[in-house]
Amino acid sequence: MKIIIAPAKKMKIDTDSFAIAALPQYLAATQQILASMRQRSFAELQTLWQCNDKLAHSNYDWLQQLDLQQQLTPALIAFSGIQYQYMAPDVFSAPALAYVQANLRILSGFYGILRPFDGVVPYRLEMQARLTVGQSVNLYDFWGAKPYQALQTQPEPIVNLASQEYAKIIRRYLQPNTEMVDIIFGHWIDGKIKTRATLAKMARGEMVRFMAENKVQQLTELHEFTHLSYHYMPDLSTPTKLVFLD
């Protein structure tokens, strides 16, 4: 079983808590992206990042000096957004850490795909950002099938806890013998099931922790997830979509 999640915009450097296990698999490709970004003006990058002046200046200055092989933080710890806060990997047991290293993969516009203990640097780049790299018109085009190939070294189910923008890089290359199951965290609003982004991020982090703590190997084991008052809804679910409602 493999689990895919999205990265977070908020990142930190922590070279002390955990040791890195390896460098990212596609680091040479990341270097190409970095070179392309460094060719852009401040104004072009601010448009790419879609952020305010303060953040843009901070990220622009960092971009000029970052080294892809220095001051590395394990990816699982480097991302510190809501999903990762609720996952709380810094308090995982040794078996839970081993589980995520074997099963969890983080999709990334900058790195393509990451294992939890791949060493990374802080960056700002969404998968859907309109960045041309060489002959590639955007990052989906640039990365192509690489993330999927790294994820699916053997046929096994994929549990999708990523956003649509990130899951797209995997979904478009799915093979007929690969089962990808979307996890939906929703709420009844005006007679319809709707997803609240912040609550969904919280629940995704909680589900990764649930899977790691219980060493989940079968999709049916996910039915027992009840964190944050979510409950599995069998009547609303299908073989490729598990729905949890609050």
Image: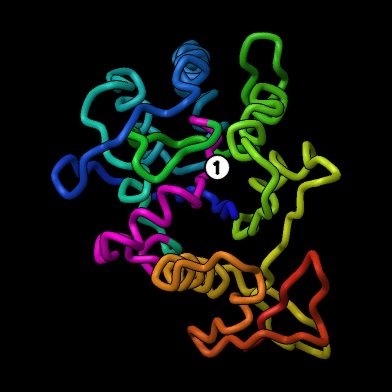
* On screen, residue 96 above or below 174: below
Q: What's the residue at 29%, 64% (across, down)? A: 92
Is residue 101 a member of the stretch shown in magenta? yes
Residue at 66%, 85% (x, y): give it. 232
Residue 51, how many percent across, how many down?
Answer: 48, 42
Q: Which residues are magenta?
A: 84-111
Q: Horizontal placement of 177 versus 245: left or right?
A: right
Report the amino acid beneath label 1.
Leu
Quadrant in which residue 19 is drawn: top left
Mark 1 lies on a secondary structure that is: strand
- In-image side of 114 versus 217 (left or right): left
- Point 66% across, 22% down: residue: 142
* Residue found at the far right of this picture: 176
Q: Position of residue 172 (x, y in %)?
A: 79, 39
Q: How many marks?
A: 1
Residue 192 coordinates in the image, percent (x, y) = 81, 84
Residue 27 or residue 99, whichever sits in front: 99
Of the 4 image quadrants, the one containing the N terminus is: bottom right
State the residue position of label 1. 107
Q: Say if 113 sits above or below 92 in the image.
A: above
The residue drawn where x is 45% and y is 48% is 102
Q: How is the image coloured?
A: rainbow
Bin the neighbour count of mark 1 within 10 Å (Cα to Cα): few under 14, some 14-19, many 20 and up.
many
Is residue 152 a member of the stretch shown in magenta? no
Toward the viewer: 152 or 71? 152
| Res. 80 image quadrant | bottom left
Single out the residue that lies furthest toward the left.
16
Q: Name the residue nearer the viewer: 237 or 49.
A: 237
The picture places residue 155, in percent across and down from the top left corner, at 70, 44
Main SS of residues in magenta: helix
